[in-house]
Amino acid sequence: MNNKEKLQGIFQHLHNNPELSWEETETTSYLRTELEKYPCAITTFEDCTGLTADIGSGKPVVAIRADIDALWQEVNGQLQANHSCGHDAHMTIVLGVFQRLVNQLDEFEGTVRFIFQPAEEKGTGALKMVDKGIVDDVDYLYGMHLRPIQELSYGQFSPGIQHGAARFVTGEIIGEDAHGARPHLNVNAIQIGAELVQHINNTHLDPMVPHSMKVTSFQSGGKSTNIIPGKAQFAIDMRAQNNDLMDAMMTKLEQITTLLAQLHQVEINLSIGANVAAAKVNEDALNFIEQGILDKFGEQRLSPMITTTGGDDFHFYTIERPHLKASMLGIGCDLQPGLHHPNMTFNHESITDAVDILTSTILNTLKQT
């Protein structure tokens, strides 16, 4: 069995066995089994999923990260865990780079750390790994992400991804129910929700910076249609191309809900769920990935850095540890219909191409740092 067939077998196993954020126990076990086939120093964690593996020794320390969790969504009429964001491919790519470099230890000096991070979809996995200290001694950090066909076609690669910030807020309107014939005895939570949507739609921030805020879920009332509901639950999806605008948008939302609560004499609570920071791409790291693309595939396969409204918690590493030099490889793979679509597909040939690029990138970083 050649290397490409091995990687396809690994991918198929990971694709067929998706696990949700913080529940990636079997995924972690499988990854450890694959890594233990080679000489390396593996670290696992007692209180969470995920693991790291080190090869080589000393400085510099260059790390590469894969996210390992899946989404929960309806697929062909059935709710299930599903790898529709490409994390199965990301794990396969990092294992492929590991298999290449563990057989080339005599070709470089320094340490390579392979990070298999849980809970990217929750926006909390990178922060947990930072708390574990796994990047405290790292000089360069590389990531990767499959890109939808609208951004990159198959065979094209970008040396950086300028992700935006994303924040997912849940809220609750807390009032009292009333009889449908006596609307003067309470305030209809559905009407408060309608006002919330209107105020959000009338929120204006810097038009030069892409951003959006929208209500994506609202539940109120029950089976009895003669009750005016006083309570409701809602969710809001927030996006901004930089972290400062995200903070400004959150301030606006807090002002809106505070004023609505005062006006209608109800309680409105907000809670931040997943929270993903906008990218801080390092020019040196970007240049090393660009060099890796050029080394393997030439200028005709090199695309400029991508700016996208999507988010990734990868960027918490550089925010929490500013010394890190980091960038993400954008992988063109004809991904359709889109990321997070339950029936997402892509050209699997891109997996070995990405392994080639990132192996070259890491070797160049080790030799030139």
Image (cartoon, helix red, strand yellow):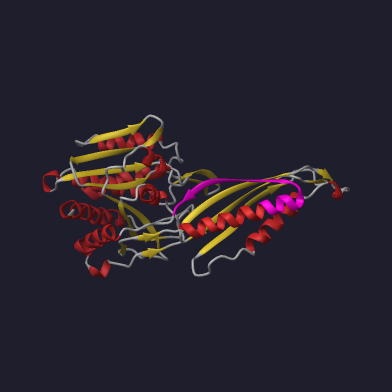
Task: Specify start and end residues of the magenta stretch as a single range.
Answer: 258-277
Q: Nearer the viewer, residue 113 or 351?
A: 113
Q: Nearer the viewer, residue 95 or 181?
A: 181
Q: Nearer the viewer, residue 306 or 351?
A: 306
Residue at figure coordinates x 66%, y 58% from the top left: 197
Residue at figure coordinates x 47%, y 45% from the top left: 122
Residue 66 left/right relative to 6: right
Image x and y of residue 144, in percent:
33, 54
Magenta stretch: residue 272 in it? yes
Relative height, residue 283 to residue 80 (above, below): below
Q: Residue furthest left?
A: 106
Residue 18 left/right relative to 55: right
Residue at figure coordinates x 39%, y 52% from the top left: 315
Image x and y of residue 125, in percent:
42, 42
Image x and y of residue 243, in percent:
46, 57
Residue at figure coordinates x 28%, y 55% from the top left: 354
Magenta stretch: residue 183 in it? no
- Quadrant (top left, top right, bottom left, bottom right) of the N terminus: top left
Residue 251 left/right relative to 37: right
Image x and y of residue 246, in percent:
51, 57
Residue 24 visible in the displayed image: yes
Q: Nearer the viewer, residue 180 or 87?
A: 180
Q: Residue furthest top?
A: 46
Residue 216 visible in the displayed image: no
